[in-house]
Image (cartoon, coloured by chain):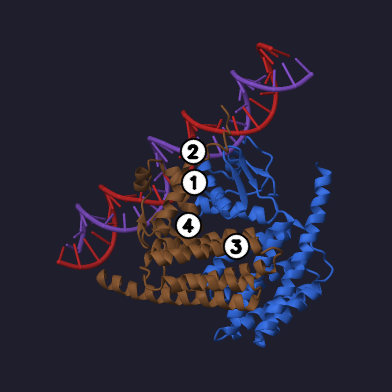
Chain colours: A brown, B blue, C purple, D red
Amino acid sequence: MQKNASTVLGLAQIHNKSLREHVLDTLRAAIVNGELKPGQTLIEADLAAELGVSRAPLREAINILSSDGLVEIMPYRGTTVKKLTRKDIEELFAIRSMMEVFAIRHIILSESPAEVINAMREVCVAMQTAADDGDLSAINLLDRHFHDTLVASSGNDLLLMLWGTVSMRVRQVMSLRNRKKGDLHSIARNHHTIVDLIAGRDVEAAVQEITQHIGISGDVIAEAWEAQNAITMEKAP
Amino acid sequence: MQKNASTVLGLAQIHNKSLREHVLDTLRAAIVNGELKPGQTLIEADLAAELGVSRAPLREAINILSSDGLVEIMPYRGTTVKKLTRKDIEELFAIRSMMEVFAIRHIILSESPAEVINAMREVCVAMQTAADDGDLSAINLLDRHFHDTLVASSGNDLLLMLWGTVSMRVRQVMSLRNRKKGDLHSIARNHHTIVDLIAGRDVEAAVQEITQHIGISGDVIAEAWEAQNAITMEKAP
DNA sequence: CGAAGGTCGATTGTCGACAATTTAATCTTT
DNA sequence: AAAGATTAAATTGTCGACAATCGACCTTCG
């Protein structure tokens, strides 16, 4: 019995995840996918039963989510998915912008940005074809991949770790609104522009572009968020 | 009756808030104070006995520490305080610089930076007197307070949350080296310069100054870190 | 002598039960 | 019927016990 039967069957060793990890991933996914909505209360016993585990690993998972700021624990009173205000969203995109600017600076100043640039170019052409097909979910996935790659390519592991928190929240916000299907091509074009500026090694221009890129989408989303929330508040006072 | 009377941490057992919180604070403090050293293994049963709690809340605390990146959990094999490499420290100070630059930008662009500036000036004069007294620990405390205030004054709560992680690590690194007692006055002066530049609303100059300030201390510490580690490695191979 | 395999002790992972706390509902008193 | 006290139900917080897993040591066989 080899414990490492690797390279032939790439799927053999997925069983090794602890229950805590499994529950954590599940809950996190549910929150960022919008299945668990902000304000919703999480009851340990119910969730444990639903996931078929005991409360111990479930609690451990919830505590981690709490320290990540995705849920709020009120002692003896329950845990709820943290609500998102407009200010939260504005702050989120400001931080996101800060991190991506940092990443771009470091990529351009790095020794061999060529590989990174090539990888990102590929994502861009994939975006192009997805836009041609009008495939919104593909665009969203590629968008995520683009920015994840950007941050990871900074070479700063601590940034990547902090980015985990930030990108989770971005995904959550994205999933909770209905993206307009209008301008898929402009999305692809914008990302292409960013890559070009990085390739041109023009730090300030690239920083300017990404700042604007994120800033605009942040403003749009924050506004749409408020509008949408005004409606739901009105419906259920 | 203690199975481990060796008393790694001399800690009382007071039950006021949630045990998880209490344990979490205690362990976190022990790590950033350097009482628990990088590489040291944490044994749940021993720690639980020492703190007078059961393993459940202790595990919850450890999991949070793990998600904060302070400890490393190897399933079924143990938990260790995460080791710090030179690269970790360099990355840490790069991120710290990024965050403080962000904060300074937002403070200067905010409507009323006057209060913030006054608060920081007070810290500076306190630093001055502490330097006169040669009180190193006071300087360290004020230094922390200065930069915490700076980040908090950005008005971005998400940044403040992320700063929690970063500042913890900074404190850990600081506690693990022996700060030279030489140039206390220059520390006070440097901080004063930063405040002046913020007050002058010269964004680029202030950014330049804080970048240099953090960058230099980061380099110094990273180098000292490597030197110190070379020694301890040599002593215990 | 060395390597494959088995056993053992230590440690972590999980569970079900119990205690503490809060909220809501019910009862008492006026 | 209203205000306060009291109990009841639901939920979280904590605990001790048990199961699973890993590394080290030991045994055995080539």
**Label annotation for residue A118:** 3
Disc number lying in front (1 or 4):
1
The residue at the point 60 percent across, 83 percent down is B108
Mark earlier in primary sequence (3, 1): 1
User: Disc 4 designates what residue?
Assistant: A66
Vertical placement of B177 versus A192: above or below? above
Query: Of B65 and A51, which appears nearest the observer?
Result: A51
Dot 1 crowding, Cα within 10 Å, few <14, some 14–19, many 20+: some
CA separation, marks 1 and 4? Answer: 15 Å
The residue at the point 66 percent across, 53 percent down is B31
Mark earlier in primary sequence (2, 1): 2
Disc 4: host chain? A
Marks 1/4 in contact by CB < 8 Å: the verdict is no
B20 left or right of B3 in image = left
Disc 2: host chain? A
User: Disc 2 designates what residue?
Assistant: A15
CA separation, marks 2 and 3? Answer: 35 Å
